[in-house]
Amino acid sequence: MIRLFIPQDLSAGAELDLDEGQSRYLAAVMRQAVGDEVLAFNGRDGEWRARIAAVGKRAVRLQALAQTRPQQVGPDLDLVIALVKRARLETIVEKAAELGARRVRPVLTERTNADHTRVDRLQAIAVEASEQTGRLDVPQVVDPERLDRLLAAWEPGRRLLFCDEAGDAPPVLEALSGAAAEPWAILIGPEGGFSAAERDRLRALPFATAVTLGPRILRADTAAISALTLWQAAAGDWRARPELP
């Protein structure tokens, strides 16, 4: 069944007017008509079965029928990623949504090879990935900021998994052995790697854990996917038995 992220509140009988893009997708692309049903979620009220109540020239209206799944909270995991070229960054955001990250935080480092990005485009990719993967929320993509500023204002209580390409740190699974279910962030550097000054600062931080992703040098998108996968296996919600519908 088609799933849609809808920002409006969801409750029994609620009428939901879709935006132009979603309306065009349902009516013109997917050829849905009055009476057809979809699934809707907003990140707050769980997942709901909804019926198409009206199809206009520019808008489709839904009516919420019944909740199919209650709201669930996934792991509190940020992905901090140095800006890379557009195609790779879009892949990273898509896979971060599929792998359960709660936020994606682009950063500028000393060797970053890109200096801007379209956050609205990345957020739309996160929404689409969440719709397709069955998530009940959508990861937030925040505006880029400098790495040094992010570290200076680091959130108290959040651990940082620093993926150090130098290769002299312990493997991820070894470093995460016995890790608690607490707020975490994963840091992936630029294609040119962290500078010596950045590495020294990161290794000196009390909340940071330096790890290696193996003997080979990975591109940023491969490194992000690998680190997210290993973190989920060791400390995330992959360890919990999934609830059956």
Image (cartoon, grey):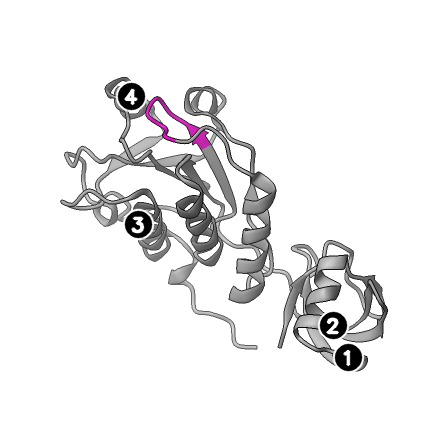
SS label for mark 3: helix
Location of the C terminus by quadrant is: bottom right
| Quadrant hosting residue 239 | bottom left
Give the amino acid type for the residue marked by disc 3 in the picture.
Thr
State the residue position of label 4. Answer: 204
Q: CA distance from mark 4 to mark 2?
A: 55 Å
Q: CA distance from mark 3 to mark 1?
A: 41 Å
Q: CA distance from mark 2 to mark 1?
A: 7 Å
Q: Give, as a single range, the part of the protein colored magenta.
A: 107-113
Q: Is residue 223 left or right of residue 10?
A: left
Residue 13 falls inside the magenta stretch: no
- Is residue 49 visible in the rendered image? The answer is no
Q: Could you tell me residue 104's position as x and y percent?
A: 49, 42
Is 27 in front, or is 244? 27
Q: Which mark is residue 222?
A: 3
Closer mark to the observer between disc 3 and disc 4:
3
Q: Give the mark, 2 or 1, whose residue is nearer the N terminus.
A: 2
Pointer 2 with pointer 1, Cβ within 8 A: yes
Residue drawn at 43 percent across, 69 percent down: 241
Give the amino acid type for the residue marked by disc 1 in the picture.
Ala
Residue drawn at 27 percent across, 31 percent down: 192
SS label for mark 4: helix
Q: Give the mark, 4 or 2, whose residue is nearer the N terminus.
A: 2
Q: Give the mark, 3 or 4, whose residue is nearer the N terminus.
A: 4
